[in-house]
Amino acid sequence: MPGSDQVMMLPIPTSCKETIRTKALELGFCAVGFSALIPQREAMTRLREMVSEKRHGEMRYLETGIAERDNPELLLPGVKTVLSVAIAGPHRKQLQDETNGIFSGHATVPDYHRVVMELLRQLLDFIRSEVGTPVNGLACVDGAPVLEKAWAESAGIGRTGRNTLLIVPGAGSMIFLGELLLDIEIEPDKPLDWDPCGNCSACLDACPTGALVAPGKLDARRCISYLTIELKREFTESETGMTGPWLFGCDRCMEACPHNQARRIRPHPAFMPSEEILGLTAEKILELTGSSFKRLFAGTTVMRLGLKRLKRNARAVVKKKGNAWT
Ligand code: SF4
Ligand code: SF4
């Protein structure tokens, strides 16, 4: 601005941007892209509709973080760029006998929040060393009030499918997302010109509870992942009936997706499944003590759930044993 003390910052050179992208891929991310700080009106409308229709259930954090989701400046003053990354997560290992309860793939591997956060911190250190001027940055993984799928779409790393999840070409939707908010200008990438779904509706057909109430529209209150991971209280009778064989999470809609069945990109090496967790049954979970729970699940996302709620999920499985699972 003429006459002001503000120093005009130019975008970093394209070569530097590409060096950052290469470093992100070397760290093991399977996709990386850059977006300018643009309004995310569609995503905000979808979020407000979900909350006003109460489809978010009891996830109060979706009500309280609206201002921050709408304006990342509230998280990092001066933010100019959102760098989005995806990392390939595990497939569910089909070792488990479904009558005794099953875990979503991500329950059996190291907690992706920690894995992605550590890699983003390394990437931020690298950016600081490359750019040569002070860089303020904020690393975000899942829990932060950031519209992660919208930013990933703007950054051109994928498109949201009818299952409401981001689909990355070659990696599908069995991925985890992360963001670096940066106060430097980086030339944005273009969104992908790609419809990942076409005429497919496999995820809607596969959902055992009808939680995908329309293409791209989720009613979390019917979603087994929400019920077994997010819900803090005991289940009602009808919720007990909905969770099927799942002890933590649900992968049915992802397993049905052709992008996951044909994915070329292998899981990041950090995500090696624990055979000990895979061998657990609902009955064994009901016998766990606080210390055996910690020994088994230390460093996994299941620690965030806690033993009390894991036992709640296990009781629901035991109660329905003998039923045909969908
Ligand atoms: S996670 Fe399970 S319950 Fe939720 S939408 Fe997908 S298939 Fe349905
Ligand atoms: S299963 Fe089919 S409709 Fe659903 S997200 Fe995958 S490609 Fe899209």
Image (spheres, rainbow, N blue to C red):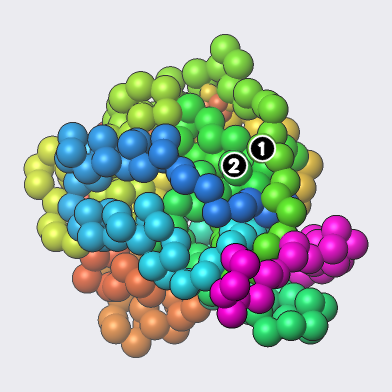
User: Could you tell me which residue is drawn at 47 percent across and 32 percent down?
Assistant: 163
Residue 147: image x %, image y %? 45, 51
Is residue 74 depicted above or below 50 in this figure?
A: below
In terms of depth relative to the viewer, which is nearer, 165 or 235?
165
Dot 2: within a 10 Å radius of its alpha carbon, few (fewer than 14), some, or many (20 or more) residues? many
Disc 1: which residue = 191
Is residue 166 depicted above or below 163 in this figure?
A: below
Is residue 287 depicted above or below 40 in this figure?
A: below
Instruction: Please tell me which of labels 2 and 1 falls first in the chain.
Output: 2
Q: Are marks 2 and 1 in contact (CB under 8 Å)?
A: yes
Q: Quadrant of residue 224?
A: top left
Residue 204 appears anywhere in the view = yes
In terms of depth relative to the viewer, which is nearer, 32 or 129?
129
Total numbered badges shown on the rendered structure: 2
The C terminus lies in quadrant: top left
Q: Which mark is residue 223?
A: none
Q: Tell me the distance, in whole angstroms, between the alpha carbons under discs 2 and 1.
A: 6 Å
Please state the quadrant of the image where ligand 2 appears. Answer: top right
Dot 1: within a 10 Å radius of its alpha carbon, few (fewer than 14), some, or many (20 or more) residues? some
In terms of depth relative to the viewer, which is nearer, 312 or 46?
46
Disc 2: which residue = 153
Residue 321: image x %, image y %? 27, 43
User: Could you tell me which residue is drawn at 69 percent across and 34 percent down?
Assistant: 192
Q: Quadrant of residue 115?
A: bottom right
The residue segment tinted magenta is 1-27
Residue 195: image x %, image y %? 63, 23
SS at mark 2 in the image: helix
Residue 258: image x %, image y %? 64, 28
Question: Amino acid under label 1?
Answer: Pro
Question: Amino acid under label 2?
Answer: Glu
User: Could you tell me which residue is drawn at 51 percent across and 44 percent down?
Assistant: 150
